Image (cartoon, rainbow, N blue to C red):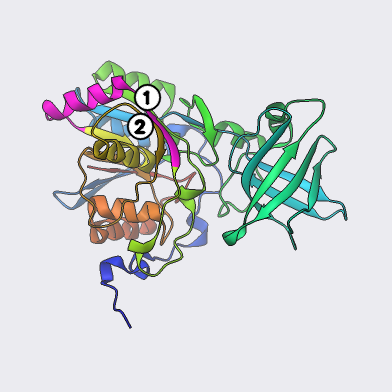
């Protein structure tokens, strides 16, 4: 039997969270989320009742980088010929009158060749069945393009731990205010806490704000099914980083200014770009960050509280150390902070 070092054992990254601390709905206002500041050097925590107080921690010259991906309504319900209901999470936004994409399907006894209907407007056929509950499906429509129909029949792709049906509010709030480039099946949730007023205040303060794009796919939230975290693989996700952002990063590094990533997706993108030689890039990113990783770009990060044994939790533990992160989570639980996508925020400095 091969012994796995504790820092690479997935069970090392498990914790218990009371069910009532999972945020099922967003706060009334975006900046009303609570904020926990985690100071890595001092190993201290600072608790704030409102995220908007992050303004006090940001200063002139800071480079704040956000992910401007936009979530499409990727959850869609259909019916079998027998009348049984199925729900699909589409991995790509369908376009045109016929489109093929990977998907997750919730339903009983799903087989290759099976067909579903969505209100007689969309026909869906299962082309292949893969491991892990994934399928290849073909969508067809006659009268209207699929990109129009997905907005009529699709819902916001809320994560499974939000145990309710998506509502109209989710099409707005499961999205950042700066979402621009459509293509994600999950939101860059660290950005939920910013509104236009706060972003304007930060710009006026001299904070430089730039954007990258990472279209979040199944890879970001896929469960880790191996005991040794080093054996986990991240599925590639599409990223775009332009020359302007690269130039700003190089300048900030030369002037020893902070580069602050809003979200784990931005962290992964920036560190991936560093390993590509800091050049503009359009393509796929499969960088997997876990404890032991050497960060080359990111000075600080804003992120939410993450699920136990997830690749996102591994990333923040790599950045701040498992011990400090778990102490922060323990204290946040005591103080009734709200967890996960619609929950409260951390600023790791």
Front-most of 244 and 286? Answer: 286
Q: Measured from the top left, where is residue 128 in percent x and y?
A: 67, 53
Magenta-drawn stretch contains 328? no
151 relative to 53 in the view: left or right: right
Local crowd size for mark 1, using a 10 Å CA cut-off: few (<14), some (14–19), many (≥20): some
Q: Is residue 13 left or right of residue 73?
A: left
Q: Are marks 2 and 1 in contact (CB under 8 Å)?
A: yes
- Residue 178's tag is none
Q: Image quadrant for the N terminus?
A: bottom left
Q: Check disc 2: other Cα within 10 Å, few if <14, some if 14-19, many if 20+.
A: many
Magenta-span inclusion, residue 249: yes
> Furthest-right residue in view?
82
Q: Which residues are magenta?
A: 237-258
Where the C terminus falls, by quadrant? top left
Q: Secondary structure at mark 2?
A: helix
Residue 335 visible? The answer is no
Position of residue 83 relative to residue 194, above or below, is below
Residue 247, visible in the rendered structure: yes
Q: Residue at x 69, y 46 (%)?
A: 137
Q: Where does label 2 land, which residue?
A: 52
Residue 214 percent coordinates (x, y): 43, 35
Residue located at (45% from left, 41% from top): 237
**Residue at 71% across, 26% down:** 148
Q: Position of residue 63 (x, y in %)?
A: 25, 27
Classify 135 as above or below 167. Answer: below
As drawn, the label of residue 198 is 1
Picture residue at 35% right of the left edge, 51% below the top: 288
Q: Is residue 249 left or right of residue 125?
A: left
Disc 2 to disc 1, how far (Cα)? 7 Å
Q: Hey, which quadrant is residue 142 in on the image?
A: top right
Q: Nearer the viewer, residue 285 or 262?
A: 285
Residue 85 in the image, given as x and y percentages of width and height: 79, 53
């Amino acid at each position: 039997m091969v012994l796995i070092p504790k820092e690479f054992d997935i069970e090392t990254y498990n914790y218990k969270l009371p069910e009532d601390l999972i945020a099922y709905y967003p706060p009334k206002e975006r900046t009303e989320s609570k904020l926990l500041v985690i100071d890595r050097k001092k190993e201290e925590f600072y608790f704030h009742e409102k995220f908007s107080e992050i303004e006090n921690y940001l200063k002139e010259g800071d480079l704040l980088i956000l992910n401007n991906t936009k979530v499409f309504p990727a959850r869609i319900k259909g019916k079998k010929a027998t009348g049984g209901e199925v729900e699909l999470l589409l991995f790509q936004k369908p376009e045109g009158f016929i489109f093929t994409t990977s998907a997750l399907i919730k339903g009983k006894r799903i087989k290759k060749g099976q067909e579903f209907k969505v209100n007689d407007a969309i026909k869906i056929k299962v082309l292949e069945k893969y491991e892990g509950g994934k399928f290849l499906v073909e969508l067809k429509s006659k009268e209207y393009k699929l990109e129009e129909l997905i907005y009529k029949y699709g819902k916001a792709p809320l994560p499974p731990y939000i145990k309710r049906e998506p509502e109209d509010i989710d099409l707005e709030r499961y999205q950042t205010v700066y979402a621009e480039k459509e293509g994600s099946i999950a939101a860059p949730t660290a950005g939920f806490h910013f509104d236009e007023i706060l972003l304007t205040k930060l710009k006026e303060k001299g904070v430089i704000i730039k954007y990258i794009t990472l279209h979040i796919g199944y890879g970001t939230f896929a469960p880790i099914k191996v005991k040794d975290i080093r054996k986990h693989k991240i599925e590639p996700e599409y990223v775009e980083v332009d020359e302007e952002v690269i130039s700003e990063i190089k300048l900030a590094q030369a002037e020893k200014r902070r580069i602050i990533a809003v979200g784990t997706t931005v962290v992964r993108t920036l560190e991936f770009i560093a390993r590509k030689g800091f050049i503009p890039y359009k393509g796929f990113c499969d960088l997997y960050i876990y404890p032991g990783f050497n960060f080359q770009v990111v000075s600080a990060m804003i992120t939410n509280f993450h699920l136990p044994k997830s690749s996102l939790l591994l990333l923040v533990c790599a950045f701040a150390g498992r011990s400090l992160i778990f102490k922060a989570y323990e204290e946040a639980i005591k103080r009734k902070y709200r967890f996960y996508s619609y929950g409260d925020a951390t600023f790791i400095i």
